[in-house]
Image (cartoon, rainbow, N blue to C red):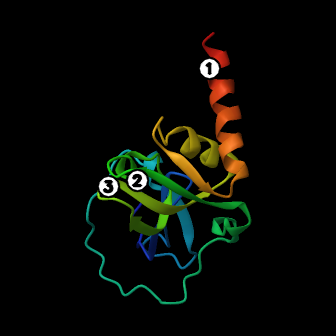
Amino acid sequence: SDREVLPYRVYSNWGHWYVRGPEVGDTEVKQFRVDRMAGAHLGDAEFVAPSDVSLPEWLDLSAYERTVTVSVPAGVLEALPRPHTIDRVVDESGERVRATVRVAGEGHLDHLLVSLGPDGKVVEPADYEERRRRHARRLMDLYS
C-alpha cells in the first residue's frame, strides 16, 4: 500500500533500517522497516520532527553487547563484518592496529572472531581466542 510517512527518526539495528513517524494526516507514531519498502521518494509535506520521539525498547541491545580487543593487519579492520562499533584504534607498528570492537550478540561475535584472518589475534578477553578456534573448527567441519 502507498503511505506517506513523516520520518521523525531513522535508525538501524541488527542490519535493518527503520523509519519512525506518523503517516501524513495521522498522529500515531509508527515504525516501518525501510528494506520492506518497494520504493521511496521525497513528499510535499513540511514538518518539524518533535525532539521527544522515543525509540522502541527492543532497540536497546546493551545486554547483548560483546566487546573484544583485537590486533590485526591495518587493512583487515575495514573488512570486518558489520554491524559493529569500533571504540578505539591504536597503531601498533604501522602495519598492524589494535582495536576495541563492540558487536551485539553471540552470533555476531563469533562471525567477527573468525573474520580476523590468520594474522589476526584476540588480545582480550583471552578466552575469546579459544572461542575463535572452536567456531572456526565448527565451520571447517561443515565442509569436511
Q: Quadrant of residue 104?
A: bottom right
Expressed as whole percent of the image width and height from the top left, the position of residue 6 reads 41, 73
- Name the residue type under label 3: Ala
Instruction: Write the residue at 29% across / 81% down.
Output: 46
Residue that carries the numbered disc 3 in the rendered image: 40
Residue that carries the numbered disc 2 in the rendered image: 2
Residue 12: which numbered mark, if any? none
Q: Nearer the viewer, residue 69 or 86?
A: 69
Expressed as whole percent of the image width and height from the top left, the position of residue 69 reads 56, 60
Instruction: Write the residue at 40% across / 53% down.
Output: 2
- CA gap between label 1 and label 3 equals 42 Å
- Nearer the viewer's eye, disc 1 or disc 3? 1
Upstream in sequence: badge 1 or badge 2: 2
Q: Nearer the viewer, residue 7 or 138?
A: 138
- Name the residue type under label 2: Asp
Q: Nearer the viewer, residue 125 or 77?
A: 125
Q: Can residue 1 be seen at all in this image of the molecule?
A: no
* Badge 3: residue crowd in 10 Å (few <14, some 14–19, many ≥20): few
Callout 1: SS: helix
Q: How many badges with numbers are in the image? A: 3
Q: Are marks 2 and 3 in contact (CB under 8 Å)?
A: no
Instruction: Write the residue at 67% across / 17% down.
Output: 141
